[in-house]
Amino acid sequence: DNARKSLEKIYRVYDLLRYYKKRNIGDEDEEVKEFIKDLEKGFEDAMDDDFNTPMAMKVIFEFIDKINNKLKEKPLGPETSRAAQEALRKVCNVLTLLQDVKEPDINPDEIKSLLEKYGLEVEAKSAEEGVDILLKRREDARKEKDWGTADSIRDDLKKLGIEVEDTKSGAVWYIKRRF
């Protein structure tokens, strides 16, 4: 169970970085570049120490914690997110983690049904855009203190495997992977 939770933590950050990489909503962050250098140096030191896997995992989770804390403060810019995601993928690949990571699929018909359920008569260009539209509707419901609708949208998305996290800068989402 601990191994599964650890793997979920790695994928969660990887997928959140993917989210920010695709959107231009945050600022580039120099401190994250330092986090990346620390990750790469710490990981290399662990590998040079007779392939010290426990030390390597410790370095990876320190990086993940730093990124999580940074994301709690503010969204990251696309280039910073891309660099952090790539660094995480690179070191995890050495340990056969994040191998051939494919973006999880979202069923466009299910998203279309939810758009209709909430009276959103828009034609989403993609399932991802549909999720973004639903989250905008959820944000509006929250502003109107319509907690029932806001919670219902979140719960309906969760049933489809889409996790919604509220941050200081708004809701972000990712697809919860199944292990």
Image: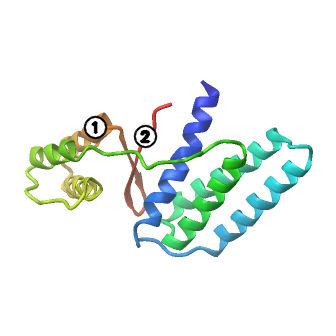
Numbered tag placed on residue 96 in the rendering: none
Q: Nearer the viewer, residue 107 or 74?
A: 107
Residue depicted at x 15% and y 49%? 115
In x, y percent, where is residue 60? Answer: 71, 49
In x, y percent, where is residue 90? Answer: 67, 56
Q: Assess whether mark 1 and mark 2 are in contact (beta carbons under 8 angstroms).
A: no
Q: Is residue 11 visible?
A: yes
**From the image, which quarter does the N terminus lie in?**
top right
Q: Quadrant of residue 176?
A: top left
Q: Marks 2/1: CA distance?
A: 13 Å
Reply above or below: 44 against 34.
above
In x, y percent, where is residue 92? Answer: 67, 48
Q: Nearer the viewer, residue 166 or 59?
A: 59
Q: Of marks 2 and 1, which one's residue comes earlier in the chain?
A: 1
Q: Dot 1 corresponds to which residue?
A: 155
Residue depicted at x 46% and y 71%? 26
Q: Dot 2 corresponds to which residue?
A: 176
Q: Amino acid at mark 2?
A: Lys
Left or right placement of residue 161 versus residue 53 in this view: left
Mark 2 surroundings: few (<14), some (14-19) or many (≥20) residues within 10 A: some
Instruction: Describe the element under mark 1 as helix, strand or loop.
Output: helix
Left or right placement of residue 159 versus residue 93 in this view: left
Toward the top, the furthest residue is 1
Q: Nearer the viewer, mark 2 or mark 1?
A: 2
